[in-house]
Amino acid sequence: MPLFTRCGISIAPRSNSPKRCRGWLRRLLTRSWLRPFEEHLKQTKGHVERLEKAFKRLDASTRGEKCKAMEGLIEEGKSTLELDADDMVRDALLIGVAQKVEHYEIAGYGTARTFAQRLGEDNIASLLEETLEEESETDRKLTQIAESAVNPDAENQND
Ligand SMILES: [Fe+2]
């Protein structure tokens, strides 16, 4: 099942650990309107457990090469955090980076789910579908937060 595991590697626990994003996500979480994102960090533990179940079922290892795309997004988050900009502008940019992470995860989980379906691994496909829904919901919440609170304030500070 190399097709699936190759795809899974990019979203595997090691490369997707909340610990790795902690610095800039912590900044997002200090803002009261971003509390829903904290909930997603808790969900991520469940995502890791589901991936571990899927890999175990396939008798595959979750240890693999680092995901360069995710590494790049994490670096983008770190450098955005260090930008010399007003708080609201920086927050708006950080939400944008967080959404890039969510979109990457959605693409990875969606591809892996479809591969699992094609390979007749319905249990794995269901596990991945649950995670995919939670990732999509988080992306929608981030859009709402950005559009309703952060982006308008960032625009005002940018005047
Ligand atoms: Fe996510």
Image (tube, rainbow, N blue to C red):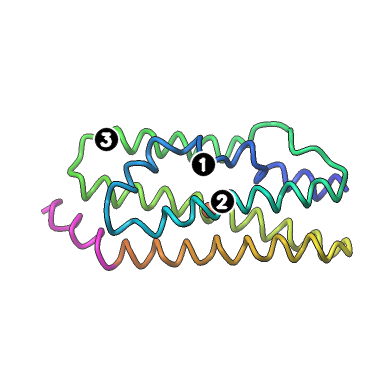
Q: Position of residue 46 (x, y in %)?
A: 62, 53
Of the image marks 1 and 2, the number of the one nearer the N terminus: 1
At x 64%, y 36%, the residue is 14
Please, what secondary structure does the residue beneath circle 3 have?
loop
Q: Nearer the viewer, residue 28 or 96?
A: 28
Which contiguous range is marked in magenta? 148-159
Q: Residues within 10 Å of mark 3 (few under 14, many from 20)?
A: few
Which label number is shown at residue 44?
2
**On the rendered structure, is 48 left or right of 39?**
right
Three-letter residue code for mark 1:
Pro
Q: Are marks 1 and 2 in contact (CB under 8 Å)?
A: yes
Q: Is residue 151 magenta?
A: yes
Residue at which label 1 appears: 18
Q: Is residue 79 magenta?
A: no
**On the rendered structure, is 149 left or right of 36?**
left
Q: Residues within 10 Å of mark 1 (few under 14, many from 20)?
A: some
Please, what secondary structure does the residue beneath circle 2 have?
helix
Which tag is nearer the camera, tag 2 or tag 3?
Answer: 2
Three-letter residue code for mark 2:
Thr
Which tag is nearer the camera, tag 3 or tag 1?
Answer: 1
Q: Residue furthest left?
A: 159
Please, what secondary structure does the residue beneath circle 1 have?
helix
Disc 2 C-beta below 8 A from ligand 1: yes
Q: Position of residue 88 (x, y in %)?
A: 21, 50
Q: Quadrant of residue 120?
A: bottom right
Q: Please, is residue 84 above or below residue 112 in the view?
A: above
At x 20%, y 45%, the residue is 87
At x 29%, y 52%, the residue is 92
Which label number is shown at residue 83?
3
Q: Nearer the viewer, residue 33 or 118?
A: 33
The CA distance from mark 3 to mark 1 is: 22 Å
